[in-house]
Amino acid sequence: MAKQIFINLPVSNLAKSRAFYEALGFKINPKFTNETEAACIEVSDTIYLMLLVRPYFQTFTDRGICDTSRELQVLLATNVDDRPQVDSLMSVALAHGGTEAGAARDYGFMYQRSFADPDGHVFEVFHMNEAEFPGADAPVS
């Protein structure tokens, strides 16, 4: 069985967060979704975002939940097929309540942009040409 990754994110408004990720083209997994506490966003066959309202999220930990307007708990990154898709996904995120979370970066072999979702969780969207990565032709030891 393939390993699955569930990334749990605290959210303030479940309906707004759910709509944001659906606008980005992700599907909802109804098996792990309800109307009041949680929505499961399918990123891939093995990666899911669990959007959990803050009080429900808090039941899973004794630690405080960070204030994403000032702090960053985790930096999430996802790849896309080409550079235009980086800009396209950013445009959709910004049009649906996301905010730009830094300047675009072009490293030659990799192009990336970042957005924060409505709750301040930061995602880097990038396209990387691994063949152009510095040292890509070096032998593996």
Image (cartoon, rainbow, N blue to C red):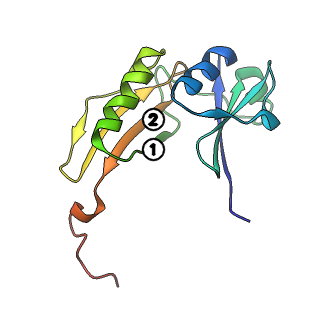
Q: Residue at x 71, y 22 (%)?
A: 54
Q: Residue at x 45, y 44 (%)?
A: 78
In the displayed image of the protein, which residue is found farthest to the bottom? Answer: 141
Nearer to the camera, 38 or 44: 44
Which of the 4 quarters of the picture holds residue 115?
top left
126 versus 123 height, above or below: below
**Total of numbered circles in the picture?**
2
Which of the numbered marks, if any, corresponds to residue 27? none
Nearer to the camera, 12 or 36: 36
Nearer to the camera, 84 or 109: 84
Label 2 SS: strand
Q: Residue at x 21, y 61 (%)?
A: 132
Q: Amino acid at mark 1?
A: Thr
80 versus 22 height, above or below: below
Which of the numbered marks, if any, corresponds to residue 78? 1
- Across and down, in percent, residue 31 comes to 82, 37
Q: Amino acid at mark 2?
A: Phe
Disc 2 versus disc 1: nearer the observer: 1
Residue 27 as seen in the image, left or right of residue 95: right
Q: Earlier in the sequence, mark 2 or mark 1?
A: 1
Q: Which residue is mark 2?
A: 123
Residue 36 as seen in the image, left or right of residue 135: right
Q: Are marks 2 and 1 in contact (CB under 8 Å)?
A: yes
- Across and down, in percent, residue 55 comes to 76, 21
